[in-house]
Amino acid sequence: MRAYHPGDDCGRIVFDPDEIMRKRGLTDAGLCRRAQIRPEQLRRYRQNKIRFVTLDVAERLCFALECQFTDIFHYLPPAEDSAAGEDSAAAGEQGAPGKQAF
């Protein structure tokens, strides 16, 4: 097992609420209302512009979606991260929804 050193690529946390939202029949507006977050905040999560998640927001998202943290946040190790970044960029060009990494 390797220790982390500043500057190391340690992977990414991916925010992907789409499957749970579909199962719950929730729109972005509905999720924002139930979790008491601003639409811009959810948009920033989806666009990979949030660098940290407070436990308060994570708790509200899980409560609103009636799910576990790991249902909407996933860890991608460094090797998978670079491939996901390329996939996300390609999905963004096509306008298709995809997993968003922090």
Image (cartoon, rainbow, N blue to C red):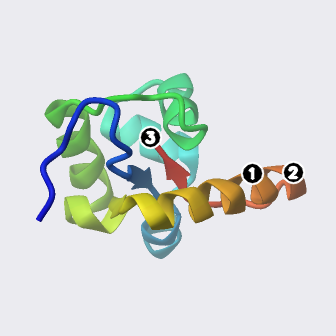
- Vertical relation: 82 (above or below) 4: below
Secondary structure of residue under mark 1: helix
Question: Real-space Cα distance between discs 1 and 3?
Answer: 14 Å
What residue did someone put label 2 on?
93
Residue at left offset 53%, top offset 28%: 49
Q: Could you say which disc has been placed on residue 89 in the image?
A: 1
Tell me whether the residue at label 2 lies in contact with that at label 3, contact meaning CB atoms closer than 8 angstroms.
Answer: no
The numbered mark, 1 or 3, whose residue comes first in the sequence reads 1
The numbered mark, 2 or 3, whose residue comes first in the sequence reads 2
What residue did someone put label 3 on?
102
Task: Using residue 75 as the reference point, say whether residue 59 is left or right of it.
Answer: left
Amino acid type, residue under disc 3 in the picture: Phe
Q: Could you say which disc has been placed on residue 38 in the image?
A: none
Residue 12 at x, y percent in the picture: 39, 50
Residue at left offset 34%, top offset 62%: 74
Tell me whether the residue at label 1 lies in contact with that at label 2, contact meaning CB atoms closer than 8 angstroms.
Answer: yes
Q: How many marks?
A: 3
Residue 90 at x, y percent in the picture: 80, 58
Amino acid type, residue under disc 2 in the picture: Glu
Work out whether residue 58 or residue 52 is closer to the camera in this orientation and state it.
52
Tell me which corner region of the image, top left, top right, bottom left or bottom right, holds residue 84. bottom right
Question: Real-space Cα distance between discs 2 and 3?
Answer: 19 Å
